Amino acid sequence: MEARTLELVFPEHTNPLGAAFGGFVLGLMDKVGSYAAARRARKPVVTVAVGSVEFKVPIRTGDLLEVVARVVRVGRTSLTVEVEVYKERFGQENGRVLATRGELTYVAVDAKGQPVPVDAPEAINGDAGTD
């Protein structure tokens, strides 16, 4: 299962040097990651862990970001999502560049916020996973 979105980086998303705040980028990653997890779980999810996040190249004011989230593991109640952030600068030859990559974990929840099983786990990359 996958989710993606586009976002333009404005000055309010950056520090005085014009580089995007890490929290801004992490917020986008968490938002799109939760969309992918919720689509797969077919129910609400909450973030329970942010694994390794690697900021590979700076993201600057004016960059167009494409945030791509893919469910890579499904457990009994949890889902692991790999999120990649690509940046694109209009008019530059190098085009779309992987800027940030990370892994986030979500848990499916009921209306009271209690963990619930993800319906019918399916194999992701050949591994259904377990909690």
Image (cartoon, helix red, strand yellow):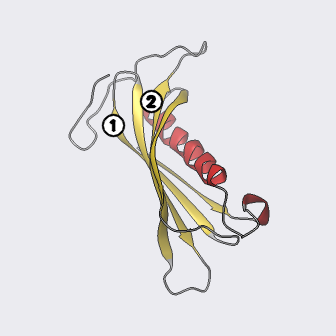
Tell me the quarter of the picture where residue 47 sits. Answer: top right
Horizontal side of residue 68 vs 13, given as left or right: left
Residue furthest to the front: 17
Q: Residue at x 20, y 40 (%)?
A: 126
Horizontal side of residue 6 vs 50, given as left or right: right
Secondary structure beneath dot 2 equals helix
Amino acid at circle 2: Ala
Tag shown at residue 100? none
Tell me the quarter of the picture where residue 31 sits. Answer: top right
For the C terminus, which image quadrant? top left
Residue identified by numbered label 1? 73
In front of the other: label 1 or label 2? Answer: 1
Tell me the quarter of the picture where residue 89 sits. Answer: bottom right
Horizontal side of residue 31 vs 95, given as left or right: right
Q: Residue at x 29, y 32 (%)?
A: 122
Residue identified by numbered label 2? 41
Amino acid at circle 1: Arg
Q: Residues within 10 Å of mark 1 (few under 14, many from 20)?
A: many
Q: Residue at x 55, y 48 (%)?
A: 29
Tell which circle, 1 or 2, labels the residue nearer the N-terminal end.
2
Horizontal side of residue 57 vs 111, given as left or right: left
Q: Position of residue 69 (x, y in %)?
A: 47, 49
Q: Residues within 10 Å of mark 2 (few under 14, many from 20)?
A: many
Q: Is residue 102 above or below residue 45?
A: below
Q: Is residue 34 above or below residue 70?
A: above
Residue furthest to the left: 126
For the N terminus, which image quadrant? top left
Q: Is residue 107 above or below residue 40?
A: above
The Cα atoms of the two marked residues, 1 and 2, are separated by: 12 Å
